[in-house]
Image: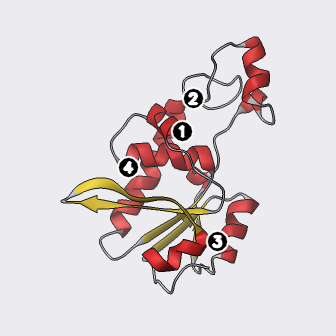
Amino acid sequence: MLPDIRPALVLSSPLRRALRTAELAALSDVVVDDDLREWDYGEYEGRTTEEIRQARPGWTIWTGDPPGGETAEQVSARADRVLSRARGALRTGDVIIVGHGHFLRLLTARWIELPASAGQRFWLDTGTLCVLGFEHGNAAMLRWNLPAAAAAAVL
């Protein structure tokens, strides 16, 4: 559960696991945002990177186009839309976003004005908390990959 904060906006992926995370964090007034769904891996859904690389050596989700799935540029466009909504709500308070690993890593890269592929540099564990914000007016990563139990101590 997150500390007693009253965000201006709570956005969640429509996928069950994200909605369950929002519920476990005792978040209320959750707005489901389809742009927060996880990356569409197309024909690679359910396959490991190692399996995919047997046919496509050196492939990564960050630089490759999964057949029938989304490119990094397409996911980046979704992330940019989410960030636009979040920035609008930040005028009145905090924003909480509940989503999925690869997408949130890409969203973080876009927040700090890096290309989508930079998301591959941010390791993100399941069920952790990250805080994005501003430092001297510049978008910044303030906290990263914090265990949920540590959230109360730092927020």
- Above or below residue 29? Residue 138 is above
Q: Earlier in the sequence, mark 3 or mark 2?
A: 3
Kindly state the secondary structure of the residue where label 3 is placed: helix
Say which amino acid is labelled 2.
Answer: Thr
- Spatial CA span between label 1 and label 3: 22 Å
Image quadrant holding the N terminus, namely bottom right
Q: Earlier in the sequence, mark 2 or mark 4?
A: 2
Residue 111 shown left or right of residue 151 in the figure: left
Residue placed furthest toward the left: 136
Q: Which mark is residue 71?
A: 2
Q: Earlier in the sequence, mark 1 or mark 4?
A: 1
Q: Residue at x 44, y 35 (%)?
A: 118
Residue placed furthest toward the bottom: 4
Residue 112 shown left or right of residue 72 in the figure: left
Disc 1 and disc 2 in contact, CB within 8 angstroms: yes
Residue identifier under label 1: 75
Q: Position of residue 92 (x, y in %)?
A: 32, 76
Kindly state the secondary structure of the residue where label 1 is placed: helix
Residue identifier under label 4: 111
- Spatial CA span between label 1 and label 4: 14 Å
Disc 3 and disc 4 in contact, CB within 8 angstroms: no
Q: Which mark is residue 22?
A: 3
Q: Position of residue 147 (x, y in %)?
A: 59, 65
Kindly state the secondary structure of the residue where label 4 is placed: helix
- Above or below residue 1? Residue 70 is above
- Spatial CA span between label 1 and label 2: 6 Å
Camera-side residue of 130 and 137? 130
- Spatial CA span between label 2 and label 4: 18 Å
Kindly state the secondary structure of the residue where label 2 is placed: loop
